[in-house]
Image: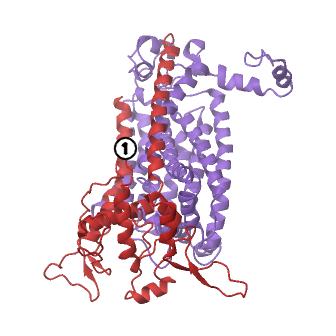
Amino acid sequence: MAQTSLGATSRIIRWIDHRLPFVAMLQRELYDYPTPRNLSYWWNFGSLSGIMLVVMIVTGIFLAMQYTPHADLAFDSVERIMRDVDWGWMLRYAHMNGASMFFALVYIHLFRGLYYGSYKQPRELLWILGVIILILMIMTAFMGYVLPWGQMSYWAATVITNLFSAIPLIGQSIVTFLWGGFTVGNPTLNRFYALHYLLPFVILAVVLLHLIALHRFGSNNPLGIDKRGPQDTLPFHPYFTIKDLFGLAVFLLIYSFFVFYAPNFLGSSDNYIPANPMQTPNHIVPEWYLLPYYAILRSVPNKLLGVILAFGSIFLMFLVPWLDTSPVRSARFRPVYKWVFWLLVIDVIALGWVGANPPEGLVVTVGQIATLYYFVHFLILFPVIGKLERPRPLPASIAAAVLQSGGGTGLGAAGAPVAKP
Amino acid sequence: MKKLLLPALALIASVLAPLSTHAEAAPSPPHQEWSFNGIFGTYDRAAAQRGFQVYKEVCSACHPVKHLYFRDLAELGYNEDEVKAIASTYQVTNEEPNDQGQMFQRSARPSDPIPGPFPNDQAARAANNGALPPDLSMIVKARDGGPDYVYSILTGYKDPPAGFNLLPGMNYNEYFPGHQIAMPPPLSDNAVTFADGTSATVPQMAHDVVTFLTWAAEPNLEPRHRTGFKVMMFLIVMAGIFYAAKRKIWAAAH
């Protein structure tokens, strides 16, 4: 068992592996790991997200060495990083834009899962772990956004923590408890800093669980059918290591463009004004990746209900494996769901637009319709379409489908439409 | 490819969305030509030095540049002696008391922050009809529209349109949200005399001082642009190599 091709050449590695089969594990999970041969580039986003998490942790640790978590000093300490710390501007811009990139990657990853039914039996727990990661990411990003202690930091902290005041009876006490005082202040900043440093490592742990659950059955694939044997798979290395590396280089190009040429494009100019409890910004908007939730929150005239729906829109994701009643995974073979999926994409973008704009006139109407559709999509359309839809026949095997679609480039073969067998 | 397009557009749309919002109706500031625009953009040193002169002789009467140190001015092309000379024209309070325990004034050194006009915000308000002149070292990054906005404010003073209810002590500015700005028109032709003979018109001074203020807000723009270019070139080459390797490795797999 300890005999591995990676370690076979070295007696030392064989000695270690006999006692701690680490190299054997790498061999099994990163080298031989049988992966569906038809994965498209949409399957790059998981590993990219993982790499992004590491980038965030590394840049974050170095920023933490220079940052001062105190209400009177935080803003200036961030500026000092930007001006006087060697490469501080790059660390900070990489971290700041990295948050946006991380969410963009994870959202694409999530919608990939929704399109190809990656949450279905036997991958329900894999999906649920993913939703937990998303929730932890939202918490981490929110608390990180507070740390520079600019105007938007301060007021975002005020607005979001105040959501808990909607809870009947104990709401106000909970808010005071979260703040560590009677307003957002230094104790709030301190605890957010502590948690912002802690949560990424919790995310890392859940990511490991996510990977363990993933490797139990392996990746889903664009056809959504199970792999039946070696003819359906390719070893992870070199086929998918090189594919992931190419994807990584392309992603880093986009990321670098933001870091070096448009570092403040995704942020709010208000956050370059020091926090001022006496002056509220004209309108308070969260970062782009939280806008849809914010839109749902504001679309409901009742505060408590708005809070419930905004949180519910995320927690609903836990139920997706059971709300979708279709036995077919991939939307490719689901003639109705295939289109409904894009309605959800449009709906979420509409919610993002609503969240970014002051709630007046058309914005309110669009927000309410989009909020309604979001819940109808998951709670009604998901189960109903699954029952009524007549799926197209599935191909006999991955290998058969790949051979049928012929050769060509990686993109072509992986993304090619599959003829009905 | 078609499948990639839609989510890509979605991402771009959701990213652009916040830009379309502005709290109050003010025309969006027209775009100006800036030396620091574009991926090879750098600061025009002559303009930035003239801009520093405008700041020093006009703006600094009310506005501080809290995040700037005298030593930073070396980046604008002043040599060490010039920086020392500029610093020595300012008086600052020493950080530590002297041997007798008394705080004392001394002339500034390059390692000192550039002192502002007022000891604290209350003093600034008291001298300005209750309005607080904002710190200018971050102003370009702290306003939507950045340098174009600041330029437009400096050049956007007009007579109020008929029927406009201008509050006492306020001034009409086309580009300021709500059009009522407490700051009186700061620039007038020949308010400063440039040593290099550049004619000190209001648009010229506004352009120069905005160049200076953009540098003040983003002093590392030049190394950022230079590093970015190297990084992008490296990544383009790596992407090409990885893609070629991917094609070769996968050639037999389809």
Chain that is purple in the image:
A
Residue linked to disc 1? B10
Residues B53 and A347: in front is B53
Q: Secondary structure at mark 1?
A: helix
Measured from the top left, where is residue A368 in percent x and y?
Answer: 36, 58
How many numbered discs sit on the rendered protein? 1
Q: Which residue appears farthest toward the left when viewing the image?
A: B162
- On the image, which quarter does residue A178 sit in? bottom right
Q: Colour of chain B?
A: red
Q: Chain of mark 1?
A: B
Position of the N terminus of chain A, as image quadrant, is top right
Left or right of B116 on screen, residue B29: left
Kind of residue at disc 1: Ala
Q: Which residue appears farthest toward the front when viewing the image?
A: B81
Residues B35 and B238: in front is B35
Left or right of A175 on screen, residue B253: left
Left or right of A124 on screen, residue B169: left
Measured from the top left, where is residue A327 in percent x and y?
Answer: 50, 30
Q: Residue at x 47, y 87 (%)?
A: B123
User: Is A226 above or below relative to A275?
Assistant: above
User: Is B221 above or below relative to A25?
Assistant: below
Measured from the top left, where is residue A392 in percent x and y?
Answer: 40, 23
Residue A153, can we see it? no
Q: Residue at x 67, y 39 (%)?
A: A209
Residue B173, can we see it? yes
Measured from the top left, where is residue B212 in percent x and y?
Answer: 39, 63
Answer few, some or many: residues within 10 Å of disc 1's Cα (few below 14, many 20 plus, some between 14 and 19). Answer: some
Residues B7 and A260: in front is A260
